[in-house]
Image: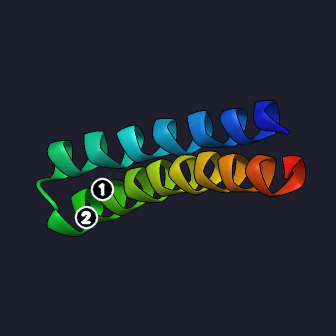
Amino acid sequence: MLVPILIFNVALVAWSLHLMQQAFDQQEFSLMLAGTLVAAAAAGMMVVYFLMNHCLSKLLLT
């Protein structure tokens, strides 16, 4: 299950970098904000995945 999530996160990070590059080229704040939000969503998804994985493994082993 980790591999599809990692692939999706890599795609999100690539998209956020693309948005930030467009923001820098066009001097637009909204694209920079969108890129930052997409990167934060990717980081949040990984944090939640690892926290839930740890919690569920503890619950299932006890």
User: Residue 52 vs residue 19: left or right?
Assistant: right
User: Residue 12 vs residue 2: left or right?
Assistant: left
Report x, y in % for residue 9. 60, 41
Q: Which residue is the extreme one toward the bottom?
A: 30
The residue beneath circle 2 is: 33
Q: Which residue is the extreme one toward the left?
A: 27
CB contact under 8 Å: marks 1 and 2: yes
The residue under label 2 is which amino acid type? Leu
Q: Secondary structure at mark 1?
A: helix
User: Residue 18 vs residue 42: left or right?
Assistant: left
Q: Secondary structure at mark 2?
A: helix
Q: How is the image coloured?
A: rainbow
Q: Nearer the viewer, residue 49 or 14?
A: 49
Report x, y in % for residue 5. 73, 42
Q: Which mark is residue 36?
A: 1
Crowding near pointer 2: few (<14 within 10 Å), some, many (20+)? some
Q: Nearer the viewer, residue 11 or 25?
A: 11
Residue at (75, 50) in percent of width and height: 58
Report x, y in % for residue 29. 15, 65
Compute the Cα span from label 1 to label 2: 5 Å
Report x, y in % for residue 34. 34, 64
Q: Which mark is residue 19?
A: none
Q: Nearer the viewer, residue 27 or 14?
A: 14
Crowding near pointer 1: few (<14 within 10 Å), some, many (20+)? some
Q: Quadrant of the N terminus?
A: top right
Residue at (77, 35) in percent of width and height: 2
The residue under label 1 is which amino acid type? Thr
Q: Nearer the viewer, residue 45 or 7?
A: 45
Residue at (25, 64) in percent of width and height: 33
Answer above or below: position of 5 versus 45. Answer: above
